[in-house]
Image: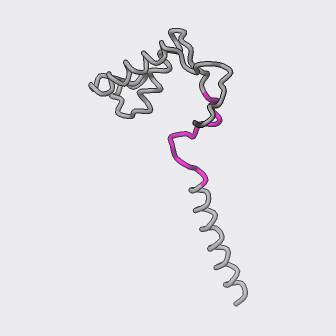
Amino acid sequence: MAARKKSSGGRKYGKAAGKSVKRAMHKRKSGTLKSGRSGRKVKSRKQAIAIGLSEAREKGAKVPRKRSSSKKSSGGRKKSSSRKKSSRKKSSSRKKSTSKRSR
């Protein structure tokens, strides 16, 4: 048997939090779960879980705190890749300009 890791805090999420997530998932499957501000249908499983947890948080269930906003990526896009592309363009234009000067 493998040795189990001891957990000092017990359960991370309370039973009430699990119920609210379960309810949100059922609503998502039936197509009636809607997001807060826009009111659009939620299709993503991750978004449904997030809605369930936030509702549980409002009710006062045992749910860990949200991650800080600085760690989250905005819109799920990586900005570093676009920076790399622009730096490549600049370097190629510099090479052309230096070759013209030598002539």
19 versus 66 height, above or below: above
Q: Tell me: 14 left or right of 97.
A: left
- Horizontal and vertical percent for residue 100? 67, 84
Q: Residue at x 68, y 21 (%)?
A: 8
Q: Quadrant of residue 64?
A: top right
Q: Residue at x 41, y 27 (%)?
A: 48
Residue reaching furthest to the left: 30
Residue at image position (39%, 20%) is 22
Identify the residue at horizontal 38%, vertical 21% (top origin).
Answer: 24
What secondary structure do most residues of the magenta stretch adopt? loop
- Front residue of 14/29: it is 14
User: Residue 4 occupies which quadrant of the picture?
Assistant: top right
Q: What percent of the width, then of the height, locates residue 99? A: 68, 84
Task: Give the answer, above or below, for where 60 lies relative to 4.
Answer: above
Residue 70 forms part of the magenta stretch = yes
Q: Is residue 24 magenta?
A: no
User: Which stretch did the figure color magenta?
Assistant: 67-80
**Residue 53 locus on image (x, y percent):** 49, 21
Who is closer to the viewer here, 72 or 18?
Answer: 18
